[in-house]
Image: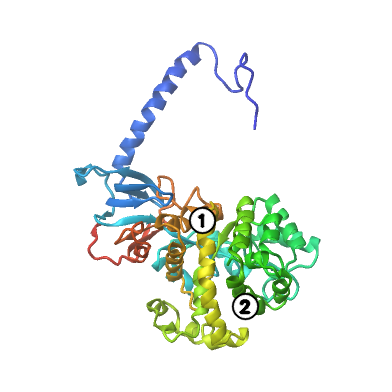
Amino acid sequence: MRPHAPASEPAPGTLTGPRTRVLKPLAICAALLAPAASAVVMAQAPADLLIRNVRVVHGDGRVTPRATVVVRGAAITHVEAARQDRPAAADPPARRVIDASGKTMIPGLIDAHVHVEPWTPAVFLKYGVTTVRDLHSDAAAIFPMAKEESPARPRIVTSGPLIDGRGSFWKNAVQVATVGEARAAVRTQIDAGARVIKVYTRLEPALVAVIAAEARARGVPVAAHLGRTTAAQAAEAGVTSIEHLSGIADSASDDPGRLLKAHDDFLGGWTAFELEWPRLSPARLEAVARQLIERGVVIVPTLALHEAFSRLSDADLRREPALADVPPEVLRGSWDPADILGRARWTPDTLAQFKKSLPVLQRFVGMYAKLGGRIAAGTDTPQQFVVPGASLHRELELFVASGLSAAEALRTATLGAAELLGIQERVGTIDPGMAADFVLLDGDPLTDIRNTRKIALVVRGGVVLGIRDSGLGIRD
């Protein structure tokens, strides 16, 4: 950045003398006239989409009871509070006009922990999820998708393949054992297009710290699914978010060595971590929460995943209506409960114990929010019986049951998640200049969070998708 020229000298390129005295008033006049000229142009050029009489829940706590929202291209250009007596003729011309009287607009939802598969994008959009953070997929598939902006699928922020220690459960993980390999892995991922780095269960604290430092030097956050590193150690190392509440039980336990050793086997480690929660002291859990909050750690609890695993032997497991959106071959194959129950050696008693853990996990989430900790909504879909999109709505319901207000829960999937992804300048709120990603609802989510499921219409990148309410006043 060039320093300012001294006050006694004209800045480089500045005109001086009599001609300047003529040009300055002209420039001032032009500046004053520019907004008016712009307004005339805006009035003459039809917008692509205008939504009138809509209640706007902006995503950051603000509510506009009645507004007109204007979309041009892929962006929101105007959000104007409307008077009750405002006539339709006062609205700017638009190619498509929607009268959304009685509807509520919210920002497009963000799922901060997913794994994109070929069948999932359309399902995400159906449920109003317009942005996702993918935390482990094959590089050749996910990086090109993340780089291409398309209204046909959610916006994708991805880590690419996760980084793990030798012997990773995931064969397509980037496996490292030395400081040099860890640093090189981070650089390679970021150069390929990673906007977040994911660390995994077999990494010891020293390598987690190396990876976090390397990523931080490149301005990239780190998401951690912990195993051999506790949550307290990960926070000290500088990770940005902790996924699944992993590592927290290990930090609060009076026998952390037993839990850390269990992570030598991936599914065995998950089982030990899940079963530990009811044994933990509330005071120890609060101490860990305060440590994480002090370090600015965001938690992505994925309560919907914990709940789904606890229900794998339930008689009504397959009665969930959202399962109609899952391809039959997926339900028959990787979602067959017998598969994971056999591999994990989970019995009906194990799952009953998982059910006892869920309320403890929820109390931790509620305490974290009450203490001022940051939370982002994520689901780990498409794990078994965690349906894309539908599971995010369930996550918000579980947050409210944990003690968050409906507004706090909604923020975890709007502005709160956008801030975690580092894209809050583009998504997460309904405001001029933001991406035209939003959802129209038939109910108010601030009075009942379940109303996020009552979707009348989804807009992604300015494109209207899946109109489900024939009562909407639409004029093309």
Q: Is residue 83 left or right of residue 379?
A: left
- Place of residue 17 in the rendered image (x, y in percent of width and height, measured from the top left): 53, 11
Quarter of the image where the C terminus is located: bottom left
Q: How many residues crowd mark 2 within 10 Å: few (<14), some (14–19), many (20+)?
A: many
Disc 1 marks a residue whose amino acid type is Ala
Q: Is residue 352 left or right of residue 238?
A: left
Relative to 346, residue 107 above or below: above
Identify the residue shown where x is 56% and y is 20%: 14
Q: Earlier in the sequence, mark 1 or mark 2?
A: 2
Q: How many residues crowd mark 1 within 10 Å: few (<14), some (14–19), many (20+)?
A: many
Residue that label 2 marks: 271
Contact between labelled residues 2 and 1, with CB atoms less than 8 Å apart: no
Label 1 SS: helix
In the image, 199 versus 397, the foreground residue is 397
Quarter of the image where the N terminus is located: top right
Disc 2 marks a residue whose amino acid type is Thr
- Place of residue 462 in the rendered image (x, y in percent of width and height, measured from the top left): 39, 55
| Residue 239, image quadrant | bottom right
In the image, 282 versus 397, the foreground residue is 282
Q: Is residue 402 left or right of residue 449?
A: right
Relative to 242, residue 50 above or below: above
* Residue 322 seen in render: yes
Residue that label 1 marks: 369
| Residue 338, image quadrant | bottom right
- Place of residue 55 in the rendered image (x, y in percent of width and height, measured from the top left): 30, 51
Label 2 SS: helix
Alpha carbon separation for disc pair 1 and 2: 26 Å
Q: Is residue 29 left or right of residue 167?
A: left
* Residue 117 seen in render: no
